[in-house]
Amino acid sequence: MKTITIDGPAAAGKTTLSRIISEDLGFVYVDTGAIYRALAFYMKKNNIDFKDEIKVCKNLNSKIRPSGEKIFLNNEDVSNFIRTEEISMGASIISSYQKVRDYLLDIQRNIGKEFDCVFEGRDMGTKVFPMAQIKFYLDADIETRARRRFNQLKDKGENPLYEKVYADLEKRDSQDMKRKHSPLKPASDAFLIDSTLIGVNEVREKMIGIINSKWAKI
Ligand code: DC
């Protein structure tokens, strides 16, 4: 199977680019952040404090299944409940626990065994798929990412405060980068792309150019 990984911090454009690239190539798109989010949603629903590592780790018994753009928790579609700021932060907190990461590892790897995929996440190229044929690390400066996230929330009809969006992103990046287990960082063999000054189409062209030239050589 062919695997392309796209890692990077929050709001760097991973979702947009992963969707486009997977469509271009006819690959399955897998948003691994949604898997962590679904688990955080389960903890919230069961009144389990995200910060209570022992309790979180004692409650790793739910079935999480991504399917296309949807994510199922114990056979219930929870896709519409996982995109809140509380769940973003909760997912970031519980994702720092080794047992949580181990619990979710096979779900991700098993999908990669069955389909040609584009996987989006934080540790796709470093930990989950170290043998992936092509790895990208997508980044942009924090002001650009905060502005993009702010506009996304406005487009969704919300009334965000830019300073809060910025502070939340900064906190989440710091948690994701400084955690002990599988911290966010570029794989040593990842192609680094900074989208601060370039738009979606240009990033797409760069990525497709890299994919084509790499696959021509394999
Ligand atoms: O990509 P996202 O914003 O939906 O991810 C939510 C959180 O889940 C993120 O802050 C950290 C965690 N996560 C992770 O630790 N590893 C992944 N592969 C994907 C997400």
Image: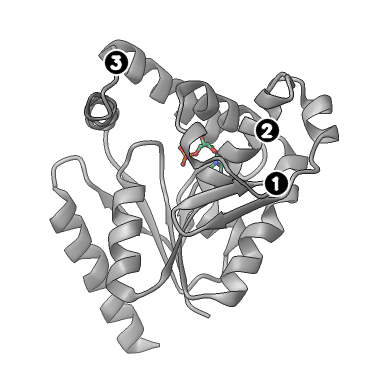
Assess mark 3: CB under 8 A from ligand 1? Answer: no
Q: Secondary structure at mark 3?
A: loop
Instruction: Check the picture and name the quadrant holding the C terminus.
Output: bottom left
Amino acid bearing label 1 = Asn
Sooner in the amino-acid sequence: mark 1 or mark 2: 2
Q: Residues within 10 Å of mark 3 (few under 14, many from 20)?
A: some
Residue 179, position as x, y percentages in the image:
61, 33
Position of residue 112 in the picture relative to residue 148 (left or right): right
Q: Residue at x 27, y 71 (%)?
A: 24
Looking at the image, do the residues carrying marks 3 and 1 touch, with CB atoms under 8 Å apart? no
Depth-wise, is mark 2 or mark 3 nearer the camera? 2
Question: Do the CB atoms of the residues marked 1 and 2 lie less than 8 Å apart?
Answer: yes
Is residue 184 in view? yes
Q: Secondary structure at mark 2?
A: helix
**Residue at image coords 49%, 51%:** 70
Q: Is 24 located above or below residue 10 in the figure?
A: below
Is the C-beta separation of discs 2 and 3 under 8 Å?
no
- Name the residue beneath numbered marker 1: 74
- Res 160 label: 3
The tally of labels here is 3
Q: Quadrant of residue 77?
A: top right
Crowd band around label 2 with a 10 angstrom C-alpha radius: few (<14), some (14–19), many (20+) = many
Q: Is residue 65 above or below residue 164?
A: below
**Residue type at mark 3?**
Pro
Instruction: Between label 1 and label 2, give the one nearer the viewer.
Output: 1
Q: Which mark is residue 42?
A: 2
